[in-house]
Each structure stands twice: as structure tokens, then as C-alpha cells.
Image: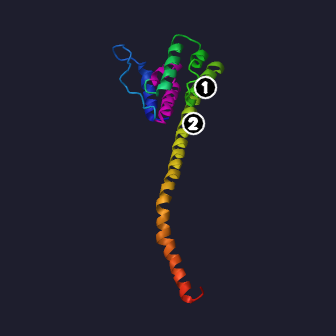
Amino acid sequence: MSLAAVLLALAVLLTGGRTRAGVRVVRTDAPAPPAEDPLAVASSLGVFAACLSSGMAVAAAARASAPHSPRPLADVLERAADLLALGGDPASAWSTAAGTGDEHVDALCRLARRSATSGVALAQAVSELADQSRLDAADAARASAERASVLIAGPLGVCHLPAFVCLGVVPVVVGLAGDVVRSGVW
């Protein structure tokens, strides 16, 4: 858990998301993370877990972490926060968002439904999901790098193999053939 996430959760908890004038602070100009960022879901889940660990209600934690989340996760968090704030059943609030196509978002929905029905603490499970998301992103990056190295080896071999044969193998064979012919064995 990062220090920034803990401080953010503490600030929201202490202020209740309100300014001195009593007006709720809502930032609509904050850009969402790019969709191609593989760690965006992991960092959003980490913020959600930090908010839950600090003692925030699930609806408030979802509302606080939604604005800076990638679009599929933000939609799920906003919808669940709205339904929970209206007093909806937690299991149904998280089940309406299932089937988004993103495995980490679907796993979050399953964890939240399980937490709502069994009473298991959600913060630790979401933190572990964030860690798993980071590991999956690292594995995807490693696999992409390995694919790149394989794709680079083909052209590299096509370029360097003829040069190796012409400059390394052919002179040795010609030199040995010349020695064999001069020795009279042939």
C-alpha cells in the first residue's frame, strides 16, 4: 500500500469529502488514466483497498476511487456506490456490474458479492486483487518482451548469417581446400 493512497484515504475520511463551505468536492476535470495503461486497474484497486482499510464505508470508498479509475472499473464503482448510497442490497449492487469483460473488474464484483453475503472483510481481498493485477501486468510485459526478442531474432539471423558464412566459414573452407590440393592428397 502506498503512502499517497493512505494519505488520500485519511484526508477523505477526516474531511468527509467536504470543503469548509460545506460543499461536496467533485472533480470532473480530472482525466481518467489511459485505457492502455496495464497498471491503472491495479492502482485503482489499491486506492479502493486503502479507502476500505481506513474505515470508509464501501459506497464512499467506491465513490472516492471511481474518478481516477479506468472506464470499465469506474462504471462499476460508480454504479455500486450509487446503489449502495440509495440503500440497495450490496449483493445486487455488485451483481449488476458483472460481465464487463475485464477479469479484474469481474473478480472485484465477485469479491464484493461474497463480502456482502458472508461478512468477510473486503479490504484485504481487494488489496490481494490489486497485487494480482500488478503481477498479471508484469507477466504480460515479460511475455511481450519475449515475443519481441523472438521476432527480432529472425531478421537478425537473416542479416548476419550470410555475412558470417561469407566472412567466417568460406575463407576457412577455401584455405583448407587449398592446403589439401597443394599437398597432393586430392
The amino acid beneath tag 2 is Gln
- Residue 118 shown left or right of residue 3 in the figure: right
The residue most toward the right is: 118
Tell me how many marks there are: 2
> Where is 69 relative to 133, above or below?
above
User: Quarter holding the C terminus?
Assistant: bottom right
- Rendering coords of residue 82 (x, y %): 50, 14
Q: Which residues are magenta?
A: 37-66
The residue to which callout 2 is attached is: 132
Residue at image position (55%, 40%) is: 135
Residue at image position (38%, 27%) is: 31
The residue most toward the left is: 21
The residue to which callout 1 is attached is: 111
For residue 20: magenta?
A: no
Q: Mark 2: which secondary structure?
A: helix
Residue at image position (55%, 85%) is: 181
- Report the magenta stretch's main SS: helix
Mark 1: few, some, or many residues within 10 Å (few <14, many ≥20)?
some
- Nearer the observer, 107 or 85: 107
